């Protein structure tokens, strides 16, 4: 079974990547893994405040990834595997791929305007050398119809 890993956040790039991965999984009898990243919070001298900030960030990420999973299910997709991880984005994605050798492809969306984000820059550049799966880079300007046709 093919497994497509999508990094979920609030960007249009993530929406495009998720749409492509969901359509591709449906056509290949595959499944989607959703990974929400929670960036490490800057150090705060007051532990209680720090814990509250971290918990709020994690709750936002969990809501985001759960909503994405619900959208997939409403479109008739299989239940995705959902993960929320705290840490630096590139390191977290690399570790996730190491822990999940069943992942067939890392699906990233490109911005429709401006330069690439840090994940696209890393995983399509020097960071690509040690990957255990291909990277699908989905152009951000694709319409839903184009994504359907290409997936």
Image (cartoon, helix red, strand yellow):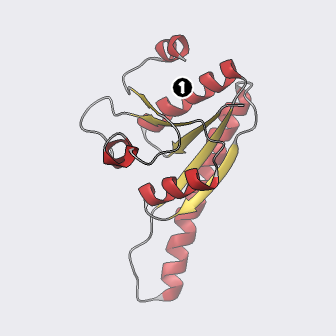
Corner quadrant of residue 124: top left
Please give left or right for residue 31 compared with residue 57 in the image.
right
Name the residue tied to disc 1: 20
Residue placed most toward the observer, 59 or 16: 16
Q: Residue at 39% x, 80% y: name it.
A: 43
**Vertical comparison of 43 with 4: above or below:** below
Q: Dividing the image into 4 quarters, which one contains the N terminus? A: top right
Q: Residue at 52% x, 71% y: name it.
A: 54
Location of residue 143 in the rendering, given as x and y in whole percent from the top left corner: 44, 17
| Residue furthest left in the image | 114
Which secondary structure, mark 1?
helix
Question: Quick one: label 1, few (<14), some, or many (20+) residues within 10 Å?
Answer: many
**Vertical comparison of 94 with 7: above or below:** below
Q: Residue at 42% x, 55% y: name it.
A: 90
Please give left or right for residue 53 compared with residue 126 in the image.
right
Residue placed most toward the observer, 130 or 147: 130
Location of residue 46 in the rendering, given as x and y in whole percent from the top left corner: 45, 89
Q: How many marks?
A: 1
């Amino acid at each position: 079974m093919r497994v497509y890993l999508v990094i979920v956040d609030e960007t249009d790039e993530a929406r495009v990547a998720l749409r492509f991965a969901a359509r591709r999984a449906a056509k290949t009898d595959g499944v989607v893994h959703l990974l929400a990243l929670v960036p490490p919070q800057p150090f705060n001298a007051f532990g209680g405040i720090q814990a509250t900030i971290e918990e709020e960030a994690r709750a936002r990420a969990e809501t985001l990834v759960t909503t994405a999973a619900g959208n997939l299910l409403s479109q008739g997709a299989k239940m995705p595997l959902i993960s929320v991880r705290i840490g630096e984005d590139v390191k977290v994605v690399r570790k996730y791929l190491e822990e999940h050798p069943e992942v067939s492809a890392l699906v990233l969306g490109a911005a429709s305007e401006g330069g690439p984000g840090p994940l696209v820059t890393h995983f399509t550049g020097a960071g690509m050398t040690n990957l255990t799966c291909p990277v699908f880079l989905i152009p951000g300007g694709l319409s839903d119809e184009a994504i359907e046709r290409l997936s």
